[in-house]
Image: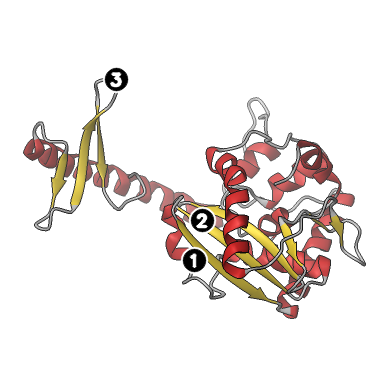
Amino acid sequence: MITEAQRIERRNYIGGSDISIILGLSSYKTPYQLYCEKLGIIETNSEQTQLQYWGNQLEVMIRKEFRKRNRVQIKTPKETISHPFHDFLRGNIDGFIPKWESVFEAKCSHQFMSQHWGESDTDIIPMEYIVQVAFYCSVMNAKSAHIAVLIGGNEYRQFKYTRDLDLEKTIIEAACEFWYAIQNQTPPPPIRQIDLKLMYPRVKPDSTIMINNELKSSLKVLRETRVKMTELEKIENASKFELMKFMKDNDCLVDENNNPLITWKETKRGSRTFLIKGTKDE
């Protein structure tokens, strides 16, 4: 867990949590957003999400469980650790295991991410975390890294990363290239709509630009997709209506084995929320 002072200081270097963003592996932030944060063009969002808050609170318990299961000591470095050859590459690690000369990382993961983690005591780790601990190993020249994760608040698993020098070389080169781009103020290309909104926050009044042949294809696909989405929404609403009509005042629809399929529960405000079990809207 890092301090607020460390969050502010992060503008001055590339850290482990930046690596997945730089490599385009993050679903939360783009390389262009990170670039703008490092230059102070936009402010870093320091407000913690609920997952981050509870992750920080539970880190102590996860660390304690790892120590108990593996009978090892975990030390917490008091300062940020710098790469031996690149001072702008630094790591704020959760801990270091002297017995194994290994980096230790504690993670909390949502239950919907469970399938992205392998069985405990394997090396099947989500790529965004692999590149993070690989970066730490390179910075510290550690022999390995161990990750302990609590999934869904009640399932503990632990994993080991064994050093992959080719991967680490790729990571360090990408991190250096990104840092030099910051120093030269050469922004990375946009990859999501949020990047374009940041690049062009204001419009030129009464300005026009002529479409080219390549974009005509994109426009055609967009129009066709909008029509399909409208048709699918009508089908969705009709199916939803039939299910609601069948459920009446029952709050759960189950299969033959009494497994929940749909819930239509009443909220505190008196309305009802329709959820299909086993989907992202659950």
Residue type, label 3: Arg
The percent position of residue 26, horizontal first and vertical second, equals 60, 55
Q: CA distance from mark 1 to mark 3?
A: 38 Å
Is tag 1's residue or tag 2's residue first in the polypeptide sequence?
1
Dot 3 falls on a residue whose secondary structure is loop
The percent position of residue 176, horizontal first and vertical second, equals 83, 62
Which residue is labeled 2 in the image? 150
Crowding at dot 3, Cα within 10 Å, few <14 / some 14-19 / many 20+, comes out as few
Labels 1, 2: front one: 2
- Mark 2 and mark 1 in contact (Cβ < 8 Å)? no
Q: Nearer the viewer, residue 208 or 189?
A: 189
Residue type, label 1: Trp
Dot 1 falls on a residue whose secondary structure is loop
Q: How many marks?
A: 3
- Mark 2 and mark 3 in contact (Cβ < 8 Å)? no
The percent position of residue 99, horizontal first and vertical second, equals 75, 72
Crowding at dot 2, Cα within 10 Å, few <14 / some 14-19 / many 20+, comes out as many
Which residue is labeled 3 in the image? 269
Q: In the rendered view, does 44 fall on the left or right side of 64?
A: right
Residue type, label 2: Leu
Is tag 3's residue or tag 2's residue first in the polypeptide sequence?
2
Task: Residue at 56% x, 67% y: name it.
Answer: 69
Is tag 1's residue or tag 3's residue first in the polypeptide sequence?
1
Q: In the rendered view, does 34 fall on the left or right side of 214?
A: right
Dot 2 falls on a residue whose secondary structure is strand
Screen quadrant of the C terminus: top left
Mark number, residue 117: 1
